[in-house]
Image (cartoon, rainbow, N blue to C red):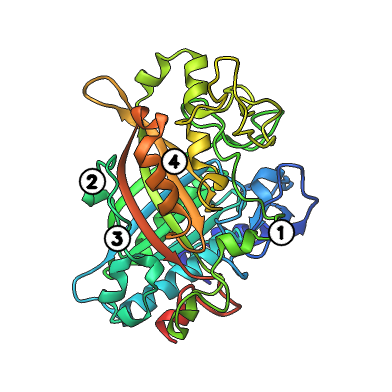
Amino acid sequence: MTESSDNHPDIEISRRRLLGTVGAAGATGLALGGVGGALTHAALSDSPAGGAAGALTSLGATEVSFQGEHQAGIVTPLQAKGHVLAFDLAPGAGRTEAAALMRRWSETARRLMAGETAPNADSGIALDAGPSSLTVTFGFGHSFFERTGLAARRPAALDPLPNFSSDRLDPQRSNGDLWVQIGANDGLVAFHALRALHKDAGDAARVRWQMNGFNRSPGATASPMTARNLMGQIDGTGNPKPSEPDFDKRIFVPAGGPGPAEHSWMAGGSYAVVRRIRMLLDDWDKQPTAKQEQVIGRTKATGAPLTGGGESTEMDLTKFGGDGKPVIPSNAHARISAPEQNGGAAMLRRPFSFHDGISTDGTPDAGLLFICWQADPLRGFVPVQRKLDRGDALSEFIRHESSGLYAVPPGPRAGEYVGQRLLEG
């Protein structure tokens, strides 16, 4: 029984019974977690007056597994609400404190992702909610390894990203020892996880920066498609697909490397590049739709390439118009970032949109919390961003304001906490 249940026994009983029966998954109720399992429950909650219990919708009942070959939140379908934040270890904290923190965080994440209460003084914020596809993902920044005396076990793939000419980075909102990504299809469930993990940090770590994001809610459109960003463009059409034979090779670190044996703790893990990209929406909205489509290289309504077809149709980069110019312009974002234009370099983009109010000049502080996953950022993100930095037509309408790179360990085994193979190996 948790500390909170000693004072409020109804909280613990309700949360445990919340997932008491198993129901069928609806079309919007499937989520990938770990190696791709989705547990869907028709959840029950206790009525305060002891009345009849009601069933949750598939959106609230869907549970993503904490355990698995890979951490949840990488191939999990996009969630409606997200919190992304970085922590720095407190002065004097080292490997011992980091291990204890990761143990606490992992237990809290495991319980909350299963629709249970937090193990320490649960706030009751999500008492009447199911797991709502909650995922919690943990990563380690470059500085973490010096702080914990583990510099010899830091992979070369975690070397700092190069400087890009278009960057306007705020160092206070970049990098960090520890990185946490929280996603859920319910805002209160996501905030509950954020609150619990922040309390778990205690004196061991302090928040360096936090960013909050959102996506379209499941079921909000009758025609599900790749996410639409705040520019109105469909974003992520070219993502690698789990069904492709080389998907794991591109996104997850193989068991045999790369790198020496002391880096084997990353086998099954991935690398996350996180960037806050502000969109200059007022400038963008002034452009006619035809100009916007030329900048992107795809139609705004459907995401189809300008060379024709549907969203999933391959771009014909060799097609020329009657004016003798490429139908997809040479500086179009979709052309420059295409894997075939970058030696096959690919990354799995899994972003959140953000809106942090109106700036003093009257423009919206809004854009994309860009998060991409790859087995090696030196072969994934870096070469693509270098090409975009040199001539992307979209650069006129965006501003890169913060950046971070994190090593995200594999998913935990039963009884294991995230990062245990590094911290205790």
Which residue in the protein does label 3 denote?
Answer: 176
Question: Which kind of residue does numbered mark 2 sit on?
Answer: Asp
Which residue in the protein does label 2 denote?
Answer: 170
Percent position (x, y) of residue 346? 54, 52
Q: CA distance from mark 1 to mark 2?
A: 40 Å
Q: Quadrant where the C terminus lies?
A: bottom left
Q: CA distance from mark 1 to mark 3?
A: 33 Å
Give the residue displayed 40% in from the left and 53% down from the top: 382
Mark nearest the camera among 1 and 2 is 2
Percent position (x, y) of residue 136? 50, 59
Which residue in the protein does label 1 denote?
Answer: 39
Considering the numbered disc 4 on the image, is that residue within a helix, a strand or a loop?
strand
Q: CA distance from mark 4 to mark 2?
A: 18 Å
User: Image check: 360 left or right of 177?
Assistant: left
Mark drawn on residue 258:
none
Which residue in the protein does label 4 denote?
Answer: 213
Mark 1 or mark 2: name the one nearer the start of the chain.
1
